[in-house]
Image: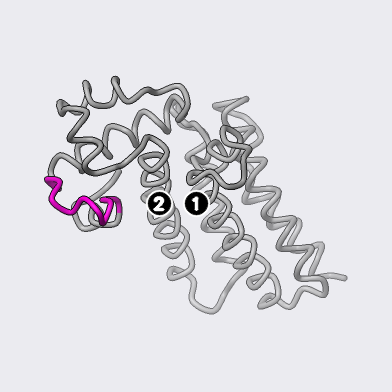
């Protein structure tokens, strides 16, 4: 969920006078609702009611629902890379172990009853138009993830690093979706093991 230190990233520069406390309340509520139920399914009226603020307060911080959705995803992006970097930092110089650690955590999250996949992937499905603010945040996240996975595959010494990196990305995206479809005991729980098998097969070539 959003933190006080990150809230300044979400407030529109043209409305700096908006109370940070109100903006944080709004973003906290929107983050929870958008992730659990989808962005399009949630209206501004429900957000302000749950946050205990007024519509003018919301629009002083976020000029539109689209910008609020983009702010939610920017916060999601920050938290995603924090988790990714934790796995990397835990295994310095060992990209194979880094990927396995990250995907192991993903596999465990997919087994939780309230799991709703990746907020970035979900938003991209909800907003097919490429110029939409929410989709743009999602696309940037996925492009950077692809770049990093390809670079990690190269660091492992894979003969075809780009193909291996893309294969790992496809496994991850599959886990996000199948985690929602199958829930507890589903195939997403073994995403780290399948990734390791793919890596092993790629390094043997």
- Quarter assignment of residue 155: bottom right
From what the image shows, is residue 127 above or below residue 159?
Answer: above
The C terminus appears in which quarter of the rendering?
A: bottom right
What is the magenta segment's predominant secondary structure? loop
Disc 2 vs disc 1: Cβ atoms closer than 8 Å?
Answer: yes
- Quarter assignment of residue 29: top left
From what the image shows, is residue 62 above or below residue 47?
Answer: below
> What segment is highlighted magenta in the picture?
10-20
User: What residue appears at the point 39 percent right and 56 percent down from the top-left corner?
Assistant: 78
User: What residue appears at the point 59 percent right and 28 percent down from the top-left corner?
Assistant: 185
Q: Residues within 10 Å of mark 2 (few under 14, many from 20)?
A: many
* Left or right: 158 as drawn, with respect to 25: right
Sooner in the amino-acid sequence: mark 2 or mark 1: 2
Residue tagged 2: 74
* Left or right: 161 as drawn, with respect to 105: right
Coloring scheme of the render? one colour
In 3D space, how far apart are the residues under numbered discs 2 and 1 (Cα atoms)?
Answer: 7 Å
């Amino acid at each position: 969920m959003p933190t006080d230190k990150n809230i300044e990233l979400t407030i529109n520069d043209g409305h700096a006078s908006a109370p940070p406390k109100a903006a944080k309340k709004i973003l906290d509520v929107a983050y929870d609702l958008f992730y659990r139920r989808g962005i399009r399914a949630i209206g501004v009226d429900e957000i302000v009611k749950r946050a205990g603020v007024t519509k003018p307060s919301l629009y002083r911080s976020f000029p539109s629902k689209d910008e609020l959705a983009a702010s939610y995803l920017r916060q999601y992006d920050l938290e995603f890379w924090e988790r990714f970097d934790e796995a990397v930092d835990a295994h310095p110089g060992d990209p194979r172990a880094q990927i396995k650690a990250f995907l192991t955590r993903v596999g465990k999250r997919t087994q939780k009853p309230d799991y709703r996949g990746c907020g970035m992937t979900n938003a991209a499905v909800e907003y097919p138009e490429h110029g939409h603010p929410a989709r743009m945040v999602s696309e940037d996240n996925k492009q950077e993830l692809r770049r990093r996975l390809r670079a990690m595959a190269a660091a492992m010494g894979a003969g075809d690093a780009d193909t291996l990196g893309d294969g790992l990305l496809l496994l991850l995206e599959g886990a996000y979706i199948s985690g929602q479809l199958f829930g507890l005991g589903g195939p997403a729980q073994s995403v780290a093991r399948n990734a390791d098998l793919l890596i092993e097969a790629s390094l043997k070539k």
